[in-house]
Image (cartoon, rainbow, N blue to C red):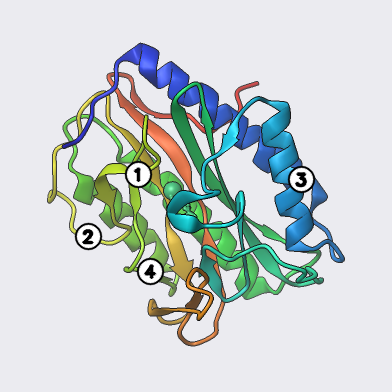
Amino acid sequence: MIILKQPEEIEKIRTSNIIVAEILKELKEKIRPGITTLELNRYSEELAKKRGATPAFKGYRGYPFALCTSVNSEVVHGMPSNRVLKHGDIVSLDFGARYQGYYGDAAITLPVGDIAEEARLLLQTTEQSLYDGIHQARAGNRLGDISAAVQSRVEAAGFSVVRDFVGHGIGKNLHEEPQVPNYGVSGRGVELKSGMVLAIEPMVNAGTYKVRLLSDGWTVVTEDGQLSAHFEHTVAVTDEGPVILSLIRN
Ligand code: MF3
Ligand code: CO
């Protein structure tokens, strides 16, 4: 069942997502060659605590960290470690927070120092595909309109969309219905309604869409070892169109 949210609830979900966005912004400022992903995790926990928010991922299905840090060929759920980020790496930071009973969830992928042209294109395309998907998050459209918009942007650039992980509804739970795939056919799937809140999160590989799980039980990597990027926003479907809740307004 897809839970529709009242405007007051959407504002609460926005508050949680603004906390997430602010934390991602502060983490972004820390990214430089030499920092470890564990330091980023520690910092994310501190920042959440300072704001009175609870990291959403820690303890979720036994995940042991507050932050997911997926480097280079890691797709999602990369676990913070003593790994040192180096010049030319890309790193995805995925953070979730619970605040006053509602969840926020967002992710960005960042360059570490200067990166190769292909990596730059991968980041740009993945972020653009997220915005293409968001643009379709309108009442009267169908879920497949979001999925198809993401997929077509990605494939037009010669990259591929991960199939094994999807976006999701979000609210009083981190994961709610519906699942939001990043591939699909426009005009198909459930009808989008005002009050739906969706975490749209394209995971895009430079090579094959195929992924595998490392023996740590969490880290998902590309099967061919090529790069992968991930961007995520929490978005409300409203009578005024899509509203990105995980975006800091100035
Ligand atoms: N943004 C991801 C998701 O919505 C992160 C989940 S990490 C986990 O599924 F540890 F919580 F599983
Ligand atoms: Co998510």
Image quarter of residue 160: bottom left
Q: Which residue, given by chain and number where applicable, does mark 4 sit on? A: 162
Q: Residue at x 38, y 69 (%)?
A: 162
Image quarter of residue 81: bottom right
Look at the numbered disc 1 and say if its residue's Cβ is closer than 8 Å to ligand 1: yes
Q: CA distance from mark 2 to mark 3?
A: 37 Å
Question: What percent of the width, then of the height, locates residue 151?
Answer: 33, 61
Q: CA distance from mark 4 to mark 2?
A: 12 Å
Q: Which residue, given by chain and number where applicable, does mark 3 sit on? A: 43
Label of residue 175 in the image: 1
108 or 149: nearer the viewer: 108
Secondary-structure class at tag 2: loop
In the depicted structure, whether residue 13 falls above or below residue 164: above
Question: What percent of the width, then of the height, locates residue 47?
Answer: 73, 35
Question: What percent of the width, then of the height, locates residue 132?
Answer: 39, 47
Marked residue nearer the N-terminal end (2 or 3): 3
Indicate left or right for 234 with 74 as reference.
Answer: left
